[in-house]
Image: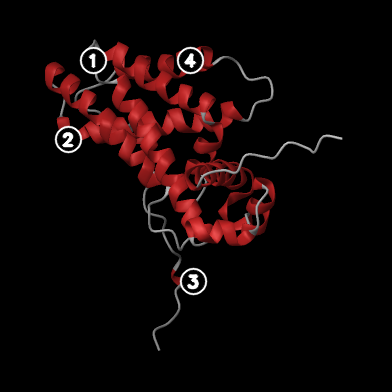
Amino acid sequence: MKSPPRRTRMTADQRREQLISVGREVFAADGVQGATVEDIATRAGVTKPVVYEHFGGKEGLYAVVVDRAITDILASITDALAEPAEFRVLIERAVLALFTFMETSPSSFEVLVRSSPAWYSGGSAASLMSAIAGHVEKMFDAAFEQDGFDPAAAPIYAQGMIGAITLSGVWWIHQPDRPSKEFAASHVVNLIWNGLRGLKKEPSLSSQASIGTPSIPVSTVAPVA
């Protein structure tokens, strides 16, 4: 009778990568607050001390998962905008790059858009979006300078564009019968591009949009002691 074949023992680097992969899936599904070292270890087929040995605990593993996801998503944007092109083409590249990241790395994207715990000092989802917008802002700077728009407004448009892509992406990846990334990206580009085509150099709000300062009836003001 033949004995069962021995399982190949993972190297330290292989085990570390496995734990990062498992941790990413757990954090994406349960959030960092809901995840436990025990759950991560069980899914990886190891004991809890192995997780502590490699990362010092759940917090250390989470920091590595987030750092890697940020590196990957920023690299995808950098690559998409590396080659000079017309403004519309750059927008299309940026939008498609982000949707591609969502499609190929959904758990990484899910981890990034979840709220960061108070103890994590690496930044929140909002700070990540700002970092991505910083890359996009450069193409707005060039386009605004060329067309005579105020460059001081470029960050506003960059932040708005990334916000539109991100929120659309959060909806998109959770659809069971979601459309293709090309379909979703084309409609986001349609919204962004046609909004940009009608830009005014000196925009203003209409008088009907003014909310004003709500008045407080005298009777509701507490007397000073």
| Sooner in the amino-acid sequence: mark 3 or mark 4 | 4
Residue 56 at what x, y percent from top left? 49, 62
Residue under the point 50% across and 36% down: 109
Which element is circle 2 on?
A: helix
Q: Are marks 2 and 4 in contact (CB under 8 Å)?
A: no
Residue 191 at what x, y percent from top left? 42, 18
Which element is circle 1 on?
A: loop
Q: Which residue is under mark 1?
A: 83
| Sooner in the amino-acid sequence: mark 2 or mark 3 | 2
Q: Are marks 2 and 3 in contact (CB under 8 Å)?
A: no
CA–CA distance in space, label 2 to label 4: 27 Å
| Sooner in the amino-acid sequence: mark 1 or mark 2 | 1
Which amino acid type is marked by label 4?
A: His
Nearest to the observer: residue 83 or residue 208: 83
CA–CA distance in space, label 3 to label 4: 49 Å
Q: Which residue is under mark 4?
A: 187
Disc number at residue 220?
3
Which amino acid type is marked by label 3?
A: Thr
Nearest to the observer: residue 55 or residue 2: 2
Disc number at residue 152?
2
**Viewer-nearest of labels 1 and 2?**
1
- Quadrant of the image containing the C terminus: bottom left
CA–CA distance in space, label 4 to label 1: 23 Å
Which amino acid type is marked by label 1?
A: Glu
* Label 1 CA crowd tier, 10 Å (few <14, some 14–19, many 20+): few
* Label 3 CA crowd tier, 10 Å (few <14, some 14–19, many 20+): few
